Amino acid sequence: MKTQKSVSARRIIIALALTGVITIPVVCLQAQSSESSEEALSIETLSQEDLREAFAQIKKAQGQRLEGSWAVTVTPVVPPGVPQPRSIRAYATLARGGAYIGSDRNRLAGIQHGTWAHIEGHEFAWTFVNDVFDAVGAFAGTHTIRAKVTLIGKDEFIGVSNGETRDAAGNLTSNRCATVRGQRITIEPLAPQCQSIPLPQ
């Protein structure tokens, strides 16, 4: 009988193989067991439970790839002949569990709150809403953004979005499309002159 440890290791190896982390055929995998020297693994010998768990691990791993903070460039899409508006710089933080918090450089807009989800493969979607204010700070309506993006590698995404603006009474005032491109915000080293500063006591 297999130990729980060997079964868990077997399932992890299967999941890694199916995600491409281990690039050898599944039929050639070998798992070390505490009760047997070697156990050959193959697709034919896997139970439905093994396969379900492996694919669940794959989906979970894929779904976590968009977590983190991003600098986003939003470029409005306009009809032919219409002058191209300038792109907008925005920032987005996507947390595990589906929380979305963002902001952009429009001083008349409030903080963006929403949710994101993994669709399949490298595709993700989100929806967020933020309050809009007039020049004197009074509430002027809401702005809702829906986006669908594709992750490229691990530090970039591209996609399309739909921005819907409503006035304070809830009436639709604009409904526009845009393209989006995101770059992951990564940890950068301290400036050389700061690295030797002693820590405060």
Image (spheres, helix red, strand yellow):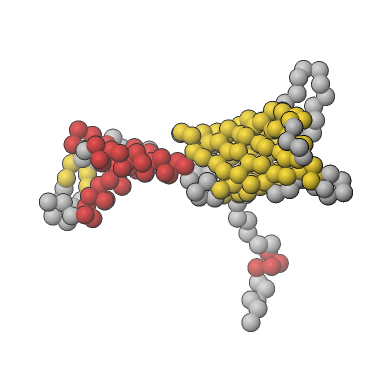
The answer to whether 108 appears left or right of 94 in the picture is right
Q: What residue is shown at x 67% (from left), y 37% (from top)?
A: 144
Q: Quadrant of residue 183?
A: top right
Q: What residue is shown at x 37% (from left), y 44% (from top)?
A: 57
User: Percent position (x, y) of residue 22?
Assistant: 34, 41
Q: What residue is shown at x 28% (from left), y 46% (from top)?
A: 11
Name the one closer to the observer, 164 or 188. 164
User: Percent position (x, y) of residue 155?
Assistant: 57, 43
Name the one closer to the observer, 193 or 58. 58
The answer to whether 192 appears left or right of 99 in the picture is right
Q: Quadrant of the C terminus?
A: bottom right
Name the one closer to the observer, 40 or 142. 142
User: Percent position (x, y) of residue 56?
Assistant: 36, 41
User: Percent position (x, y) of residue 98?
Assistant: 52, 46
View extreme (top): residue: 80
User: Disc count in the image?
Assistant: 0
Question: Could one spot residue 154 in this view of the protein?
Answer: no
